[in-house]
Amino acid sequence: MAGERIKRALSVNDILSKQYELIEFEGEWYQAFSKPENRGVWFIWGNSGNGKTSFVLQMIKELSKYFRIVFNSLEEGDGHTIQNAFIREGMNEAAKKLIITSESMSDLGKRLGKRKSPEVAVIDSYQYTEMSFKDYLRFKNKHPDKLLIFISQADGKRPMGRAAVSVMYDASLKIWIEGYRAFSKGRYIGPNGGTYTIFEEGAALYHGN
């Protein structure tokens, strides 16, 4: 329409001079995932029984060194299985930085809109949000200063459902879980080629090395 203002285009120098806030991963996290930006979308998917929950909790514990986190446990809630996983992974170490909810995405959005809200939201699982891809884009665009980490069920080696596949393609860090290893399939791959071992013995038995 006439009179609408067009957003200013960026120059090459704009891009080259832009400063980004990165997560200063160290050790095995840096080796697998380098230093990703501290906002945007990450996407983790895998089949049941491959170490996905353990990886998610290990990642939450690592991220709690840098951020406050809300874990929206839609799939398992606060059931006994999630309690066992918390005990197994020593999640008491993240207690000061982590809260656990089981709320609608609308309520999560309200929580993230408050002052001093968590910088990171982990949503498990995408299928339980019942969001279309358009719903996801609206949610993402409302929270541009947050790191949103979606966990997804899998159908074979792909995320389950068309919307989840679209979110996977949109994410900056895509992590596939198989045989107690996490493999970076996204835009951040560390010096070791993008592999993080969740459970050494289980990975060795599964992968044969």
Image (spheres, rainbow, N blue to C red):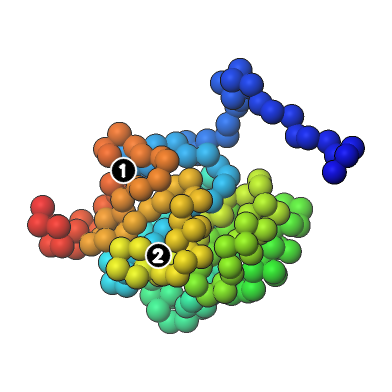
205 versus 81 height, above or below: above
Residue 154: image location, x then y, percent = 36, 68
Give the camera-side residue of 207 and 57.
207
Q: Disc 2 versus disc 1: distance between alpha carbons? A: 19 Å
- The residue labelled by disc 1 is 194
196 versus 178 height, above or below: above
Which residue is painted at 62% across and 49% down in the image?
146
Residue 141: image location, x then y, percent = 67, 52
Seen in the image, is 122 located left or right of residue 8? left
Contact check, label 2 and label 1, Cβ < 8 Å: no
Give the camera-side residue of 69 and 121.
121
- Give, as a three-letter code, the residue at label 2: Pro
Q: Write down the quadrant of residue 113 in the picture.
A: bottom right
Which residue is painted at 76% across and 57% down in the image?
114
Give the camera-side residue of 153 and 22.
153
* Residue 6 seen in this snapshot: yes
Which residue is painted at 26% across and 38% down in the image?
192
Direction left: furthest residue? 208
- Give, as a three-letter code, the residue at label 1: Gly
* Residue 28 seen in this snapshot: no
Badge 1: residue crowd in 10 Å (few <14, some 14–19, many ≥20): many
133 versus 3 height, above or below: below
Residue 195: image location, x then y, percent = 28, 46
Which residue is painted at 47% across and 81% down in the image?
79
Q: Write down the quadrant of residue 135 in the picture.
A: bottom right
Residue 58: image location, x then y, percent = 39, 57
Quarter of the picture holding the N terminus: top right
- The residue labelled by disc 2 is 159
Direction bottom: furthest residue? 80
